[in-house]
Image (cartoon, grey):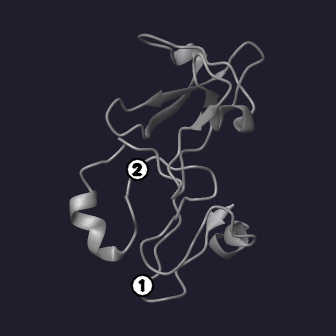
Amino acid sequence: MCLKPADGLLQEPPFAPQIAPTLNTSERILLRIAHTSHFIDRVTTSKNLKGHQVAYQLSDYNDLRSIKIQGSTKYKSLFQENGIIAGTQRGERWILWPMGIPGPGEMRQRGHHATAFLGKKHFDDIDLLERSFERCR
């Protein structure tokens, strides 16, 4: 798939991540995550492993949306009412706040992620991929 050319003057191009490498049967995908921004720095394979690695266990998202309060039968959500995680503010909020997006760059609950500062584009738009990509020629 290839990115479609912009069809509007102020259209932001879609984010196109790195292409995942081809794996041999004994290899796994490895993601190198930046320690300050939590952006994906590199997509590589286990054959290119350097440095410290942490293996994560997958859990159901719904099991992680709230946690039981220790010593109580009540649960507490990680997210505030607006879907943002408290304490995850980033520096770009001082530059991007006039755009009207609450907490730009802050960690958000599924379904609360805007993907553009101009217009409306969300991860859960039903035709986002069709509008952004086309078969390569």
- Quarter-of-image position of residue 30: top right
Locate residue 51, reporting x and y percent: 41, 11
Residue beneath disc 1: 10
Mark closer to the chain start, 2 or 1? 1
Which residue lies at the image location 27% right of the left edge and 75% below the top edge? 98
Residue 50 image label: none
**Above or below — where is 81 with respect to 96?**
above
- Give the mark toward the camera: 2 or 1: 2
Give the residue type at disc 1: Leu
How busy is the neighbourhood of tag 1: few (under 14 within 10 Å), some, or many (20 plus)?
A: few
Q: Which residue is most to the front?
A: 72
Query: Is 92 situated above or below 24?
Result: below
85 w.r.t. 136: above or below:
above
Q: Secondary structure at mark 2?
A: loop
Residue 9 image point, x, y percent:
43, 89
The image shows residue 21 at horizontal and vertical percentages of 63, 33
Where on the picture, by quarter, is residue 56?
Answer: top right
Q: Identity of the amino acid at label 2?
A: Glu
- Mark 2: few, some, or many residues within 10 Å (few <14, many ≥20)? some
Q: Where does the N terminus fall, quadrant-wise?
A: bottom right
Q: Which residue, given by chain and number where applicable, does mark 2 sit on?
A: 106
In front of the other: 50 or 111: 111
| Residue 113 screen position, x and y as percent | 54, 59
Tell me what residue is drawn at x 63 percent, y 61 percent.
123
Vertical relation: 13 (above or below) 21: below
Is residue 21 shown to the viewer in this render?
Answer: no
120 or 49: nearer the eye? 120
